[in-house]
Image: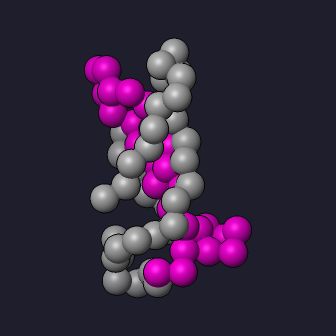
Amino acid sequence: MYYVTNNDPTKKRFRDKQKKNFYVSPFIDYDTHLTWEFEIPDERLIMLIDSVRENNKELTTSVI
């Protein structure tokens, strides 16, 4: 599980980078980081998650 803290309640969009701590995809190793970007849901949900290794994106996902 991943947690992102909200230190500014006025922000609508959040970003974070965390070390991968479980298999999201069997094709991507543990030595990667996940970058998260999402908004507080209202009428729609926007969430972007990228798997990054050595500053190169290996996998890009989005839910809109």
Q: Image height check: is 47 above or below 49? A: above
33 shown above or below 48? below
- The residue located at (45%, 38%) in the rendering is 5
- All told, the count of numbered labels is 0
Identify which residue is drawn at 50% across, 43% down: 37
| Quadrant of the rendered image containing residue 21 | bottom left
On screen, residue 26 versus residue 4, left or right, reads left
Compare residues 30 and 49 and report the one nearer the observer: 30
On screen, residue 56 above or below 45? below
Quick one: 61 or 54, which is closer to the camera?
54
Q: Residue furthest top?
A: 10
Query: Hey, which residue is sitting farthest right in the picture?
Result: 55
Q: Is residue 51 visible?
A: no
Q: Quadrant of the C terminus?
A: top left
In the rendered image, which quarter is residue 27 located in? bottom left
Q: Residue at x 29, y 20 (%)?
A: 43
Q: Is residue 54 left or right of residue 45?
A: right
Q: Position of residue 2 (x, y in %)?
A: 37, 55
> In the rendered view, would you say 27 is above or below 2?
below
Q: How is the image coloured?
A: one colour
User: Which residue corresponds to the image point at 51% horizontal and 67% vertical from the top-left?
Assistant: 19
Is residue 31 located in the magenta-colored stretch of the structure?
yes
- Residue 14 in view here: yes
Magenta stretch in the rendered image: 30-57
Asked whether 56 or 7 is in front, the reply is: 7
The percent position of residue 42, horizontal first and vertical second, equals 31, 20
Work out which quarter of the rendered image holds the N terminus and state it.
Answer: bottom left
